[in-house]
Image (tube, rainbow, N blue to C red):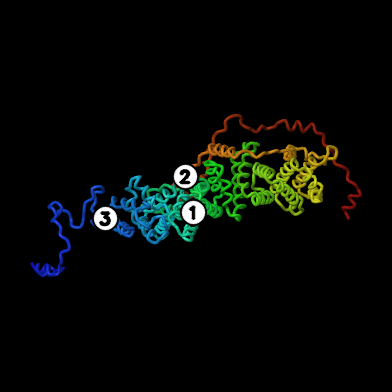
């Protein structure tokens, strides 16, 4: 029997006396009861989770280093929540704050993202999830989330690790909750200014916040994680995150930037520059992110919903190199807004409300912003993309706060409109937009300073421009020259000496509309009127169309091959003709009708012709 047994381990038994000689008693404990001996040694039972955990997983931690060791030792749920509560408390550990940048904070938050969330997130309650989100709502935590999303969503991990699907979904949901709210960036800036005392480190932390939210880092990482989750999930795609949609993220970013220039109760007087300075830099960087219309819409909507004082502060802290770009993007968004509003946006009340918004944006830095507005309105490439109500609002704004810039605008437009190269080679839409803006500016300037319009009308540039327009081969360009010359002459000349071309082309309905542009009088309204207009437009927007299902229908096949493209209409079945039929009638009386025709005799042959034929 001993031949079938093989020794796998050999142990030497030490006598009890010899063992006791090398040991020194340091602690005396009572013997364990009999019921405790039934459990495996080195484990204890947790009532809340019903699992076994190590006795080394303490219920509390005295230092942040000890808290890190507990998080790395796979604690139970009760211990985890206790540690997270201490980490999220600002007074739990002296000289340590989880929101401050540092190597120990990075290790703790990376452990929470890499170990805690995959293991505990699906089983936590709502309040417990909020505790995890609170610990991660800082620059270090957000960077840890994005880094883990990028690591588990790379093409190699998607194809090789099929067990990461649940972890991706959990991280996407945690990231969405961390970014939830319109004061996230404000809270980050306030916290960083409170916990970071060194000026240089505080500036670096602010730059990190600007670069984190103003770049496409968030959108790209979350979108990549969603694509990886769809590829690995065979039962169906998970719920889409709004962070992966560029327009929704831009709208969220605009609303968070707007909160930086309001929130007077949360910002002390000494922190205005520390919060609004990075806010201006963040807005300047976000303008290059894409989705500028969604960004401006979210920004303007949030400022109007809070208070009207945000626009002056916004323009004051915005860098000068970004003011023209911001004003141009705002005008483009207003043009899209007017296009969606339809004919209602062309009313004088709505134009006045748009002029009020532009005035609020331009007023704090009047000299620089009015020059930018004049340059935008006089540029054919930019004016052509602006809607007619926005052009009217721009002219009304300039006439109200900067009459000198309005005169410069009219002179620039007249020079462009009269240029020979512009007449012959520019698109018709650009010529139309320049002509409309020119007539609007001429009418407003004539009501404020008639002498200035008279001097421009008597200048050689206007006369030569009219001559160039009449001499061109383009019908539309020539027609615009006649209309503009007639309108300008109607402003500066007397009744009997006004220019008249005497053609019907200047008397059409469209020509009369152009001629009446010099009579349009728009005023600058109240900013609250634009807020009401924006609210009405948001209610009138139709719901978005539902996206098709991820699992498309099977494609039809023809002769064993897939057929792409739209389905072909069915072949119509030939049916019997119902109703009157077309039948051929044999005409038997055609010969009788031919008898009534008198035949003519053949003409006599000419001898000269016959001789010529013989030759």
**Element at badge 3?**
loop
Between circles 3 and 2, the one closer to the viewer is 3
Q: Single out the residue that lies furthest toward the front.
A: 270
Query: Distance of mark 3 from mark 1, alpha carbons?
Result: 38 Å
Q: Single out the residue that lies furthest toward the left.
A: 1
Q: Which residue is mark 1?
A: 213
Residue shown at 20%/57% (left/top)?
42
Between circles 2 and 1, the one closer to the viewer is 1
Query: Distance of mark 2 from mark 1, alpha carbons?
Result: 31 Å
Q: Which residue is mark 3?
A: 58
Q: Is residue 112 left or right of residue 461?
A: left
| Res. 419 in view | yes
**Element at badge 1?**
helix
Q: Estimate the x, y position of residue 252 in percent, counting from the top left.
A: 49, 47
Quadrant of residue 495 within the rendered picture: top right
**Quick one: label 2 or label 1, which is nearer the N terminus?**
1
Q: Is residue 186 above or below residue 66?
A: above
Q: Which residue is mark 2?
A: 548
Q: Is residue 469 left or right of residue 549?
A: right
Report crowding for label 1: few under 14, some 14 to 19, many 20 or more residues within 10 A (C-alpha). many
Q: Is residue 201 above or below residue 256?
A: below
Residue shown at 63%/32% (left/top)?
582
Q: Single out the residue that lies furthest toward the top.
A: 579
**In-front residue for pair 370/316:** 316
Q: Estimate the x, y position of residue 583 in percent, counting from the top left.
A: 63, 32
Residue shown at 80%/42% (left/top)?
492
**Quick one: label 3 or label 2, which is nearer the N terminus?**
3
**In-front residue for pair 49/195:** 195
| Res. 382 in view | no
């Amino acid at each position: 029997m001993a031949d079938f047994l093989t020794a796998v381990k050999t142990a030497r038994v030490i006598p009890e006396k010899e063992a006791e000689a090398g040991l020194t008693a340091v602690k005396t404990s009572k013997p364990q009861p009999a019921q405790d001996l039934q459990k495996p040694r080195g484990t204890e039972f947790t009532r809340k989770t019903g699992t076994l955990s190590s006795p080394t997983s303490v219920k509390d931690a005295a230092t942040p280093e000890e808290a890190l060791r507990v998080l790395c030792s796979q604690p139970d749920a009760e211990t985890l929540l206790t540690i997270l509560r201490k980490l999220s408390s600002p007074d739990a550990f002296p000289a340590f704050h989880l929101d401050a940048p540092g190597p120990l904070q990075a290790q703790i938050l990376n452990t929470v993202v890499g170990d805690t969330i995959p293991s505990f997130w699906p089983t936590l309650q709502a309040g417990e999830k909020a505790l995890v989100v609170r610990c991660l709502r800082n620059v270090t935590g957000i960077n840890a989330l994005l880094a883990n999303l990028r690591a588990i969503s790379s093409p190699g991990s998607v194809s090789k690790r099929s067990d990461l699907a649940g972890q991706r979904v959990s991280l996407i949901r945690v990231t969405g909750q961390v970014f939830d709210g319109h004061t996230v960036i404000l809270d980050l800036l306030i916290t960083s200014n409170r916990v970071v005392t060194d000026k240089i480190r505080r500036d670096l932390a602010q730059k990190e916040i600007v670069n984190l939210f103003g770049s496409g880092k968030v959108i790209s990482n979350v979108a990549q994680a969603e694509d990886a989750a769809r590829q690995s999930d065979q039962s169906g795609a998970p719920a889409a995150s709004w962070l992966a949609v560029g327009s929704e993220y831009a709208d969220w970013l605009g609303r968070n930037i707007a909160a930086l220039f309001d929130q007077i109760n949360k910002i002390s007087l000494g922190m205005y520059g520390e919060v609004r300075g990075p806010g201006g830099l963040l807005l300047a960087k976000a303008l290059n992110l894409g989705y500028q219309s969604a960004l401006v819409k979210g920004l303007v909507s949030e400022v109007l919903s809070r208070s009207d004082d945000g626009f002056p502060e916004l323009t004051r802290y915005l860098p000068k190199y970004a003011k023209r770009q911001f004003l141009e993007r705002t005008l483009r968004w207003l043009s899209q807004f007017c296009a969606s509003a339809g004919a209602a946006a062309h009313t004088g009340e709505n134009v006045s409300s748009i002029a009020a918004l532009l005035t609020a944006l331009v007023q704090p830095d009047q000299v620089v912003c009015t020059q930018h507005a004049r340059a935008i309105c006089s540029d054919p490439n930019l004016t052509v993309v602006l809607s007619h109500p926005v052009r009217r609002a721009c002219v009304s704004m300039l006439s109200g706060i900067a009459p000198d810039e309005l005169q410069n605008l009219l002179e620039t437009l007249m020079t462009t409109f009269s240029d020979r190269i512009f007449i012959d080679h520019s698109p018709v839409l650009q010529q139309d937009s320049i002509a409309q803006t020119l007539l609007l500016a001429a009418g407003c300037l004539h009501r404020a300073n008639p002498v200035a319009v008279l001097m421009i009308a008597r200048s050689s540039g206007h006369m030569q421009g009219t001559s160039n327009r009449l001499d061109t081969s383009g019908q539309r360009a020539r027609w615009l020259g006649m209309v503009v010359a007639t309108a300008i002459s109607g402003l500066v000349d007397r009744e009997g000496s006004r220019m008249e071309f005497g053609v019907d082309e200047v008397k059409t309905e469209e020509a009369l509309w152009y001629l009446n542009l010099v009579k349009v009088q728009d005023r600058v309204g109240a900013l609250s009127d634009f807020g009401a207009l924006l609210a009405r437009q948001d209610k009138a927007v139709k719901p978005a169309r539902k996206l098709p299902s991820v699992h498309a229908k099977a494609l039809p096949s023809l002769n064993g091959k897939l057929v792409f493209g739209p389905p072909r209409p069915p072949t119509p079945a030939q049916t019997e003709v119902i109703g009157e039929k077309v039948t051929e009638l044999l005409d038997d009386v055609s010969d009788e009708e031919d008898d009534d025709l008198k035949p003519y005799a053949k003409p006599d042959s000419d001898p000269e012709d016959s001789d010529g034929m013989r030759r």
